[in-house]
């Protein structure tokens, strides 16, 4: 007997979808207590599971749209990472505001899972693009500043590099997904 199939997902589908989120939480909790080798293993597992969960976009969006949005996302990400790395302006306050906005779009997305409003989805996607664009600059600046304070090659430096890579990876993936929702032209 099969389990419930809500929204077209099987039990394994839910595991693949939510496991990356769980691994991000695990990595954040273990960063101070475990060595960088374990964190690297979790990061690689996270990346693989994220790849599997993102594979569904090839069923939802045309390949040309995915490619176009990927290159647009990469361009925006590159420009904002450069801006965050080179700016003299302290982005700490901006980062705090963006994190509040991130919590807001997560809550709005969860509510919209039950409501199913295309207008709400559109608004969340626009706000998400703004938030993840800003977070890219903020996270890059934060990573640069942390790197300036830690000796290269130390265990702490390796942990910080992994957590910085995770932050930037999340910024890029979420920016890409928000842009794809806006400009991907879903197949019907």
Image (cartoon, rainbow, N blue to C red):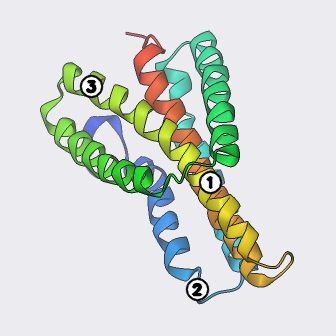
Residue shown at 44%/53% (left/top)?
95
- Residues tagged 2 and 1 counted as in contact (Cβ below 8 A): no
Left of 177 or right of it: where is 84? right
First in sequence: mark 2 or mark 1?
Answer: 2
Q: Quadrant of residue 145?
A: bottom right
* Mark 1 secondary-structure assignment: helix
Residue 62 position, x and y percent, is 55, 12
Could you give the CA–CA distance between mark 1 and mark 3, rounded to whole angstroms?
28 Å
Could you give the CA–CA distance between mark 2 and mark 1, rounded to whole angstroms?
21 Å
Closer mark to the observer between disc 2 and disc 1: 1
Residue 188 position, x and y percent, is 37, 9
- Residue 22 vertical position relative to residue 47 in the rendered view, above or below: below
- Residue 180 vertical position relative to residue 68 in the rendered view, above or below: below
Residue 69 position, x and y percent, is 58, 19
Left of 43 or right of it: where is 174? left
- Residues tagged 1 and 3 counted as in contact (Cβ below 8 A): no
Residue annotated with mark 3: 123
Residue 43 makes an appearance in the image: no
Residue 131 or 185: which is nearer the viewer? 131
* Mark 2 secondary-structure assignment: loop
Checking the image for residue 32, the label placed there is: 2
Residue 154 or 83: which is nearer the viewer? 83
First in sequence: mark 1 or mark 3?
Answer: 3
Residue annotated with mark 1: 141
């Amino acid at each position: 007997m099969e389990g419930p199939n809500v929204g077209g997902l099987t039990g394994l589908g839910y595991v693949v979808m939510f496991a990356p989120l769980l691994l991000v939480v695990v990595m954040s909790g273990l960063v101070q207590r475990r060595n960088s080798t374990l964190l690297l293993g979790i990061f690689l597992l996270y990346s693989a599971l994220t790849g599997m969960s993102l594979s569904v976009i090839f069923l939802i969006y045309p390949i040309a749209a995915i490619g176009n949005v990927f290159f647009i996302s990469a361009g925006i990400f590159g420009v904002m990472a450069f801006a965050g790395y080179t700016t003299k302006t302290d982005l700490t306050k901006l980062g705090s505001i963006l994190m509040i906005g991130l919590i807001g779009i997560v809550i709005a997305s969860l509510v919209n899972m039950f409501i199913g409003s295309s207008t709400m989805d559109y608004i969340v996607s626009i706000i998400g693009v703004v938030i993840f664009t800003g977070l890219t600059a903020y996270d890059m600046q934060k990573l640069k500043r942390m790197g300036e304070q830690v000796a290269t090659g130390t265990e702490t430096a390796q942990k910080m590099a992994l957590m910085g890579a995770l932050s930037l990876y999340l910024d890029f993936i979420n920016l890409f997904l928000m842009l794809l929702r806006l400009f991907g032209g879903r197949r019907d």
